[in-house]
Image: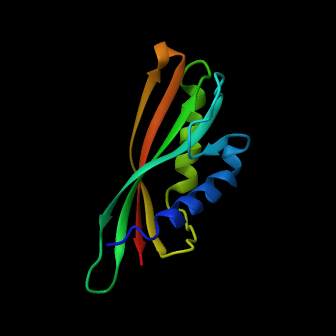
Amino acid sequence: MSYHAAAALQAAIYARLAGFAGLAGVSIVDAMPAGAALGTFVLIGPEQVIDQSDKSGGGAEHRLEIAVISDASGFLTAKQVAGAVSQALVGAALTLATGRLVSIQFLRASARRLEAGDTRRIDMTFRARIEL
């Protein structure tokens, strides 16, 4: 098992999301922005990694969390952005600097209100399988 490809996976996901036409104008970050007015943005978040090595070689399954956070009224904007994130990533042929992406799939999502209902957050989990 190796965590060796984690940074390469994050970089490839960032590049894919930042260049995806459906997310034009949406910030892609890996840390919460400072300030009161957040707008709508995509947050590349934590991950869990599970060993998937076998006799043919090394491998890992990355369960990566990506959130859409929006202070727009209602859930519509957040859901549209979350849909674009999913469209950009599911089945994408990402090129990694380390390892080879075998597949990336959507696992689940959860939508909720934050801060007395003024902010919406959709947390999505994706599973990426990497051969090393």
Q: Position of residue 76 (x, y in %)?
A: 57, 26
Visual colour scheme: rainbow
Q: Residue furthest right?
A: 25
The residue at the point 54 percent across, 22 percent down is 119
**In the depicted view, which residue is nearer to us: 74 or 26?**
26
Using residue 53 as the reference point, say whether residue 130 is left or right of it. Answer: right
Q: Which quadrant holds the N terminus?
A: bottom left
Using residue 6 as the reference point, say whether residue 107 is left or right of it. Answer: left
Using residue 52 as the reference point, say whether residue 112 is left or right of it. Answer: right
The residue at the point 58 percent across, 71 percent down is 95
Q: Position of residue 102 (x, y in %)?
A: 44, 72
Q: Position of residue 103 (x, y in %)?
A: 44, 66
**In the depicted view, which residue is nearer to us: 47 or 55?**
47
The residue at the point 54 percent across, 37 percent down is 68
| Residue 51 against residue 23 in the figure, above or below | below
The residue at the point 64 percent across, 27 percent down is 38
Q: Which quadrant holds the C terminus?
A: bottom left
Q: Position of residue 79 (x, y in %)?
A: 54, 33
